[in-house]
Image: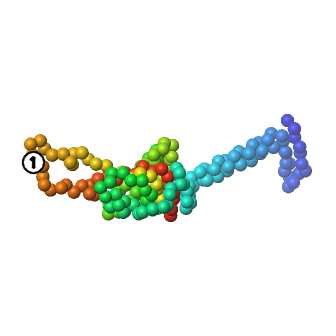
């Protein structure tokens, strides 16, 4: 044990030993370590900002861009079309698989997902306006077109417009606003 004795001050003797110095070094190192951990935790909890123009998948084409609210009427009787739409993301249903819903206006929703696996969407894309390119499809319910056995075919055409849910297989997504 190494001891250094300083001069007396007000009747007290100050003793600085080797153990006291190492203990102070350990205390300073430990407090710096805790400060670094707290700082990293605060940084890690900040939300990821999505800048305008951030792309997921391939960059979508903006040629022939249409609002998502007009997609159903644009498709008419076609079951599949390749297009680019702009719309507001309502909800990210699966962040790892890239599944989300888009507002189609009038209370309608377009279920969308990425064609390729491995594209993950951040949950804070909810509420943002996005441009999406890919293939839009109408899903038909075979039960609607069937009739009971023995019943006569009705002369009235069934109007399934608006009843068929829309789905979108996205190739690329870009944050617009």
Please indicate whether residue 69 sits to the left or right of residue 43 in the image: left
Please indicate whether residue 40 sits to the left or right of residue 64 in the image: right
| In this view, 68 is above or below 121 | below
Q: How many marks?
A: 1
Is residue 32 visible in the rendered image? The answer is yes
Which residue shows up at 18% across the image and 55% down it?
157
Residue 109 location, quadrant: bottom left
Residue 176 position in % (x across, y down): 51, 62
Residue 141 position in % (x across, y down): 26, 47
The residue indicated by pointer 1 is 152
Q: Residue furthest top?
A: 1
Please indicate whether residue 123 sits to the left or right of residue 13 in the image: left
Element at badge 1?
A: loop
Along the line of sight, the residue nearer the viewer: 24 or 48: 48
Residue 6 position in % (x across, y down): 89, 48
Along the line of sight, the residue nearer the viewer: 118 or 170: 170
Which residue shows up at 42% across the image and 53% down it?
82
Residue 169 position in % (x across, y down): 42, 49
Is residue 92 visible in the rendered image? The answer is no
């Amino acid at each position: 044990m190494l001891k250094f004795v300083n001069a007396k001050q007000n009747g007290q003797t100050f003793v600085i030993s080797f153990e006291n110095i190492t203990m102070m070094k350990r205390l300073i190192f430990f407090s710096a370590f805790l400060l670094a951990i707290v700082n990293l935790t605060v940084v890690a909890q900040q939300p990821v900002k999505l800048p305008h123009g951030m792309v997921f998948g391939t960059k979508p084409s903006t040629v022939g861009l249409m609002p998502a609210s007009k997609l159903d009427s644009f498709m008419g009787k076609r079951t599949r079309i390749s297009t680019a739409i702009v719309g507001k993301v309502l909800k990210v249903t699966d962040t790892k698989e890239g599944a989300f819903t888009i507002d189609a206006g009038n209370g309608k929703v377009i279920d969308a997902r990425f064609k390729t696996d491995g594209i993950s969407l951040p949950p804070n894309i909810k509420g943002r306006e996005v441009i999406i390119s890919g293939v839009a499809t109408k899903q038909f319910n075979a039960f609607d077109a069937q009739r009971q056995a023995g019943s006569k075919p009705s002369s009235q055409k069934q109007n399934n417009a608006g009843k068929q849910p829309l789905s979108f297989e996205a190739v690329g997504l870009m944050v617009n606003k």
